Image: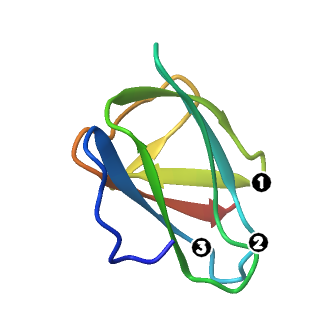
Amino acid sequence: MYDNQPVPSGYSKIVVFSTPSYTGGEIYLTNKDSSIDLHGSVTYMSIWYYFVPSGIYSVSYISSRYKAIVNAQQVSIGSSVDFTLGGYIEFIVL
């Protein structure tokens, strides 16, 4: 998605940064209403944009070869992430 798309009501725009080598990364987030699977790029795009329902999510899964940084904080399985006003994710290869 392009960065200039308007954010639909009730959603947040999440920016996902790719690793320098474009190797991907994956995080699975859940809350009482939604389950979301977000990926980093493996297609030579440095930034991807996602719209997700606004809310607070629990981290259920992170790709085994990566650490995930969400809104400037390293997260692990069980961490809470707040996407009520947007956010960003970065994957770092271990």
Relative height, residue 42 to residue 16 (above, below): below
**Are the two marked residues, 1 and 3, in contact with CB atoms closer than 8 angstroms?**
no
Query: Hey, which residue is sitting farthest bottom in the picture?
Result: 44
Q: Position of residue 2 (x, y in %)?
A: 45, 77
Q: Quadrant of residue 45?
A: bottom right
Residue 71 visible in the displayed image = no
Circle 3 crowding by C-alpha within 10 Å: few under 14, some 14–19, many from 20:
many
Callout 3 secondary element: loop
Residue 27 visible in the displayed image = yes
Between the C-alphas of marks 3 and 2, the distance is 8 Å
Of label 1 and label 3, which has the lower sequence position?
Answer: 3
Between the C-alphas of marks 1 and 3, the distance is 14 Å
Q: Quadrant of residue 62?
A: top right
| Residue of label 2 | 23
Task: Name the residue type under label 3.
Answer: Ser
Q: Position of residue 44 (x, y in %)?
A: 70, 86
Choose mark 1 or mark 3, whichever is in front. Answer: 3
| Residue of label 3 | 18
Dot label at residue 65: 1
> Along the line of sight, which residue is nearer the eye, 7 or 21?
7
Residue at x-position 31% and y-position 50%: 8
| Total labels drawn | 3
Of label 1 and label 2, which has the lower sequence position?
Answer: 2
Residue at x-position 68% and y-position 50%: 26
Between the C-alphas of marks 1 and 2, the distance is 10 Å
Residue at x-position 25% and y-position 44%: 9
